[in-house]
């Protein structure tokens, strides 16, 4: 794991490159249109960690994906598992986790990779080495102004050739909850960077609380301006089953097969599917799993350190 220091010189990336405005004949895109229908789709897909999602969603270049959820519903934790899965798929990822220090972010991802609460020192050493050239963390905790965040993204794409950049979260990017014009401009800039570079950008943000934490939110509950969901390509909502947790704590009867969480795909501009995926949370590994009775997965490929302890 490599750090992008807070003191890095990003002055060259602070100003957006001027965008050209061109009107061209429609036939200039003929070869792209033909490829759309007839080119063999043999390129490897970049997937989510859960098999049930594979037929319906994959991470395409030049897109922006929202990860929304009520505060405390585990969206950042789930995104960490996605980051580990992306690294396993030979993707290069940079993460700006603005609410957690880099060491804490990395410790959580290590637990998810190991599949247990206490990875051995040897595993941690080898895993850290394995992430070199695959994973970068922005060494900054706290708010950052929008121009700086955009510059860090451009810098990471240019210097490290990252395929994915995670911004966690929108409210730490120097804009108030009611600063709708600024929010729209920032998300629009993310979309421009993504389209210009091919990088897939992930943006974590909060959704409004309903009358109860038991309520299932929708894309219309995303905090901030409604333009955010209009601009992006994909939108997921992470929902935690607080009602099930409450029944467990109070000793009430509950249905064990009811999911601990739902991952809701509520928008996919360039795909035909939306869906709801049931997930079960394993506390030791911090993993979300499709099967309630399954053991947490354990990543050891290219690391060579095993001895999992559940």
Image (cartoon, rainbow, N blue to C red):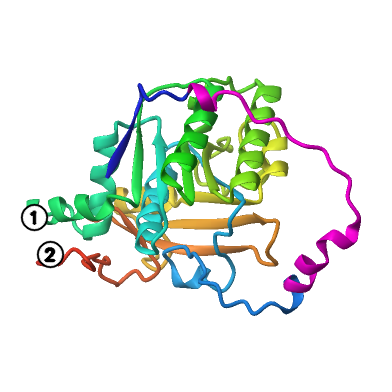
| Dot 2 alpha-carbon crowd within 10 angstroms: few under 14, some 14 to 19, many 20 or more | some
Picture disc at residue 4 = none
x, y percent for residue 53: 52, 68
- Give SS at disc 2: loop
Q: x, y (%) of residue 263?
A: 51, 57
Q: Which SS class for mark 1?
A: helix
In magenta, the rendered stretch is 11-35
> Looking at the image, do the residues carrying marks 2 and 1 touch, with CB atoms under 8 Å apart?
yes
Kindly identify the residue that appears in the image at 68 percent across and 64 percent down: 271
Question: For residue 17: magenta?
Answer: yes
Q: Which residue is mark 1?
A: 122
In the image, residue 29 above or below residue 210: below
Q: Position of 172 compared to 250: left or right?
A: right
- Residue 44 to residue 158: above or below: below
Q: Which mark is residue 305?
A: 2
Q: Can you give x and y, in whole percent of width and height, for residue 44 in the image?
A: 51, 71
Name the residue located 25 percent from the left edge and 69 percent from the top edge: 295
Say above or below: 25 vs 31.
above
Dividing the picture into quadrants, the one containing residue 9 is top left
The image quarter containing residue 304 is bottom left
């Amino acid at each position: 794991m490599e750090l992008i220091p807070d003191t890095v010189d990003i002055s060259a990336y602070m100003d957006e490159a001027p965008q050209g405005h061109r009107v061209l004949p429609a036939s200039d895109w003929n070869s792209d249109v033909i490829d759309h229908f007839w080119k063999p789709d043999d390129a490897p897909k970049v997937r989510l960690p859960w098999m049930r999602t594979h037929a319906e969603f994959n991470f395409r270049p030049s897109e922006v994906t929202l990860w929304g959820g009520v505060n405390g519903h585990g969206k950042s934790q789930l995104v960490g598992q996605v980051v580990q899965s992306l690294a396993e798929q030979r993707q290069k990822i940079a993460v700006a986790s603005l609410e957690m220090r880099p060491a804490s972010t990395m410790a959580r991802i290590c637990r998810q990779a190991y599949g247990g609460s206490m990875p051995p020192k040897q595993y941690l050493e080898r895993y850290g080495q394995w992430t070199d050239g695959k994973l970068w963390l922005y060494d900054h905790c706290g708010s950052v102004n929008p121009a700086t965040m955009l510059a860090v993204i451009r810098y990471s794409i240019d210097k490290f050739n990252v395929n994915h950049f995670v911004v966690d979260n929108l409210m730490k990017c120097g804009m108030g909850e009611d600063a709708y014009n600024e929010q729209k401009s920032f998300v629009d800039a993310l979309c421009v960077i993504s389209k210009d570079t091919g990088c897939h950008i992930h943006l974590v943000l909060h959704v409004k609380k309903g009358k109860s934490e038991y309520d299932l939110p929708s894309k219309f509950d995303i905090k901030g301006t409604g333009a955010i969901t209009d601009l992006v390509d994909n939108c997921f909502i992470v929902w935690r089953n607080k009602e099930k947790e409450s029944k467990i704590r109070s000793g009430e009867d509950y249905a064990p097969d009811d999911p601990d969480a739902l991952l809701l795909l509520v928008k996919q501009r360039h795909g035909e599917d939306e869906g709801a995926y049931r997930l079960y949370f394993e506390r030791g590994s911090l993993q979300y799993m499709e099967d309630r009775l399954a053991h947490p997965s354990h990543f050891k490929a290219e690391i060579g350190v095993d001895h999992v302890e559940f």
